[in-house]
Image (cartoon, helix red, strand yellow):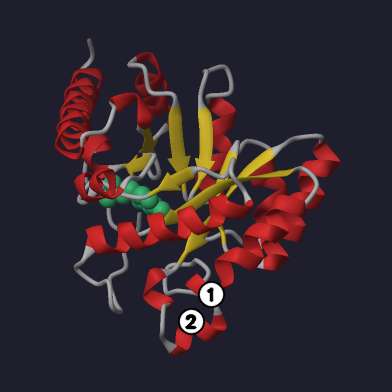
């Protein structure tokens, strides 16, 4: 094995141990959790190694990096998740490779994704990104959190819009633990709030059962809260260079 392959295999094994331990602690089954490896800023060669090591889901947050990487890896059995703030002028490119867009946070984006999905005959899975830092704040009225996402009060309406949009499939909810607001430093409480919102959403949309929460630093809290998907970058690939 190359050095990089050895390193990635060891990191993956450590993350797997953490997920298993968190599942045991929460009385959950390992197969109810999906690991998504966030490969942003790392090269296509790393994605290829991860695929060989058994990774099936990867995520990216910038189309400029993701598009060439996905093209270079199009022969691999991978699902691509887009998790970054998405401008409508990038939708055409993103729909070209993304199986799931986890960062749906506004009506205009739903319209653009739907139009492109229909045009290309693809079905795009969508998660509503919830901004928990926007809750009960002035930003909540505007609907957008500091790192993207729709405020809690906008989730139901946006979910309905996705569910009705041709070419789109409403898969569930996503959040990033907020750095500010009432949930700052309270990751598990934030993820439990997301679970409550998921319960509400599933009353109208029973199939929208994906709950994407938890990163390298807080995957245990996400598993404890009931997340179905964790998005892990640093703990698998290493600390990203600055500006990543
Ligand atoms: C970068 C990123 C992650 C992974 O974060 P790590 O701390 O490196 O595990 C997860 N989710 C989103 C939306 C990200 O942008």
Callout 2–callout 1 Cβ contact below 8 Å: yes
Seen in the picture, residue 172 relative to 131 is either above or below; the reply is above
| Residue 120 horizontal side relative to residue 87, left or right | right
- At label 2, counting other C-alpha atoms closer than 10 Å, the crowd grade (few under 14, some 14-19, many 20 or more) is many
Q: How far apart are marks 2 and 1 (CA)?
A: 8 Å
Return the disc, 2 or 1, that comes first in the chain's sequence. Answer: 2
Of all residues shown, which one is farthest toward the bottom?
138
Point 59% across, 29% down: residue: 71
Q: Where is residue 132 in the image (x, y as percent from the top left)?
A: 39, 70
Q: Which of marks 2 and 1 is in front?
A: 1
- At label 1, counting other C-alpha atoms closer than 10 Å, the crowd grade (few under 14, some 14-19, many 20 or more) is some
Of all residues shown, which one is farthest toward the right?
119
Regarding residue 169, the answer to whether it shows in the image is yes
Point 57% across, 53% down: residue: 203
Of all residues shown, which one is farthest toward the top?
1
Point 16% across, 23% down: residue: 10
């Amino acid at each position: 094995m190359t050095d990089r392959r050895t390193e990635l295999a060891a990191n993956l094994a450590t993350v797997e141990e953490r997920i298993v331990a968190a599942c045991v602690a929460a009385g959950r089954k390992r197969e109810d959790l999906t690991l998504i490896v966030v490969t942003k800023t790392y090269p296509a060669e790393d994605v290829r190694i991860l695929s060989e090591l058994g990774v099936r889901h990867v995520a990216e947050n910038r189309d400029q990096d993701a598009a060439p990487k996905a093209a270079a890896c199009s022969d691999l059995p991978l699902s691509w998740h887009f998790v970054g703030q998405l401008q409508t002028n990038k939708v055409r490119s993103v729909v070209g490779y993304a199986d799931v867009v986890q960062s749906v946070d506004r009506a205009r984006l739903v319209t653009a994704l739907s139009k492109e999905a229909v045009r290309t005959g693809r079905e795009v899975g969508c998660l509503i990104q919830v901004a928990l830092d926007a809750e009960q704040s002035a930003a909540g009225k505007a609907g957008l959190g500091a790192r993207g996402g729709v405020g809690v009060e906008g989730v139901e309406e946006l979910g309905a819009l996705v569910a009705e949009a041709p070419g789109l499939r409403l898969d569930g909810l996503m959040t990033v633990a907020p750095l500010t607001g009432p949930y700052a430093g309270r990751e598990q409480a934030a993820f439990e709030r997301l679970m409550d919102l998921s319960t509400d959403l599933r009353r109208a949309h029973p199939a929208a059962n994906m709950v994407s929460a938890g990163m390298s630093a807080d995957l245990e809290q996400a598993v404890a809260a009931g997340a179905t998907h964790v998005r892990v970058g640093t703990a698998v690939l290493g600390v990203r260079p600055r500006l990543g």
